[in-house]
Amino acid sequence: LSRESYRKFAAKPIMLSELSDLLYYSAGLKIWEDKEKQAKRVYPSAGGRYPLEVYPFIFKVRGIPPGIYHHHLKTHSLELILEPPFFKTTMKQFNQSWIKKAGVVFVITAIFDRTTAKYGDRGYRHILTEYGHIAQNFYLIASALGLGCCSMGGFIDNGLNEMLDIDGIDEGVVGVIAIGSKKEKPQ
């Protein structure tokens, strides 16, 4: 019931443990202890194809230097893609100034062939549905952690693709989610 789009971030960092929880419970890999140890992701994917990749653009997270990272799913770790300065270039890819105060901006991409190889043109629709699943997970986990969260569609696709060194054809940005500490309401 507390899930909402929230844009009034405080200019203070989020915690490393919060970032870890956001990634693990929104887009992570869980080991299921049933008959056999099985690793399954925490969100559904058409045909189990899992085309989505998560790139945290870290602005303010206590314990992690600012940078653009790739979430390595199997080890639940971050791989550094780009070190600062990247902030000004990042801001040019958005028409919303409020994201400046976010702690992290998750740029979600899709490797399209993972799904279209099986489903053809319909695979693109499945990919967008999957983005909806993962975005809602980020919203719910952020709400549970008391953080603000807002998915946004106002971004420059080619600019973000270029920053991530992806071509926008084989792999391209499908969505962006900003998360940050909430501004405290005046008493």
Image (spheres, helix red, strand yellow):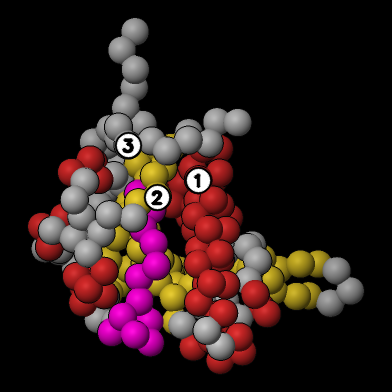
Mark identifier at residue 87: none
Label for residue 151? 2
**Residue 187 drawn at (x, y percent):** 34, 8
> Where residue 115 appears, x then y in whole percent?
56, 83
Q: Is residue 19 left or right of residue 105?
A: right
Secondary structure under tag 3 reads loop
The residues bearing labels 1 and 3 have C-alpha atoms spaced at a distance of 12 Å
Q: Which residues are magenta?
A: 167-178
Examine the rendering and report whether any part of residue 168 can be seen.
Answer: yes
Q: Quadrant of the N terminus?
A: top right
Q: Judge whether 20 appears above or below 143 on screen.
A: below
Q: Amino acid at mark 3?
A: Arg
Q: Which residue is pictured at 38% across the width and 35% down the height? A: 6
Label 3 belongs to which residue?
7
Mark 1 burial class by Cα count in 10 Å: few <14, some 14-19, many 20+: many
Asked if disc 2 and disc 1 are in contact, CB closer than 8 Å, the reply is: yes
Circle 1: residue type: Tyr
Residue that appears at 52% across and 84% down: 121
Residue 93 vertical placement versus 116 (above, below)? above
